[in-house]
Image: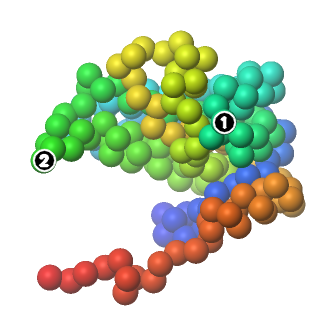
Amino acid sequence: MDIKELIMSRHSVRSYKADPLSPEVLSDILEAGRLAPSAQNRQPWRFIVIQGTDKIKSLSVNCGLLGLSNFFIRQAPCVIIACADTRRSIRINDQDYYLVDTAIAFQQMMLMALAHGIGSCWIAAFSEKKLRKWLKIDDKWKIVALSPFGYPAEKDTLHARMVSGFARSSNRLPLEQIVHYF
């Protein structure tokens, strides 16, 4: 699949098979994040990989009240939490670039996963305070997002269909509404 096909076919997956990711595939996904561009090559991203049913179930209950809609992550064989070490950030135009840099790296990881037939779902619904406490991570790290990674199930669960509908995951604005020529 070429890059255009990957981008055009990427979508949020919320139903997974239990099949684990091979170490080689997981390494490819993580390497895609490592190779991402960043402001002044600061590379602020840090990734926490969680595998195993018990650990992922524990993660799902430690995402706080906001994260309750994400219990579907329990089906996935792997969850990656994208964090940023704020000490490795740079501030330009009154903007901290750790968020931008980490988002680029995480998106590259999702595209690499898709190239291997693995689905993912960008998740921002979590309590950073509660998740930080459970993970016991450094105070200088910000949790940017998390995503399950796994082979898509043959059929979406009812919950997956409901959350996708609520999130309006398939709705995209037309180019005329988002592109402005100067």
Query: Would residue 90 appear left or right of 142 to someone viewing this image?
Result: left
The residue positioned 58% from the left and 74% from the top of the image is 171
Depth check: 105 or 121 in front? 121
| Residue 82 in the image: above or below residue 116 | above
The residue positioned 63% from the left and 62% from the top of the image is 167
Question: Can you identify the residue that label 2 sits on?
Answer: 93
Which dot, 1 or 2, sits closer to the camera?
A: 1
- Locate residue 91: give its quadrant: top left
Kind of element beneath mark 1: helix
Question: Can you identify the residue that label 1 sits on?
Answer: 65
Depth check: 20 or 80 in front? 80
The residue positioned 68% from the left and 49% from the top of the image is 118
Q: Is residue 170 visible?
A: yes
Separation of residues labelled 1 and 2 (CA atoms)? 34 Å
Query: Would residue 108 appear left or right of 61 to someone viewing this image?
Result: left
The residue positioned 52% from the left and 75% from the top of the image is 172
Quadrant occupied by the N terminus: bottom right
Query: Would residue 49 appear left or right of 35 to someone viewing this image?
Result: right
> Residue 143, image x and y in percent?
46, 31
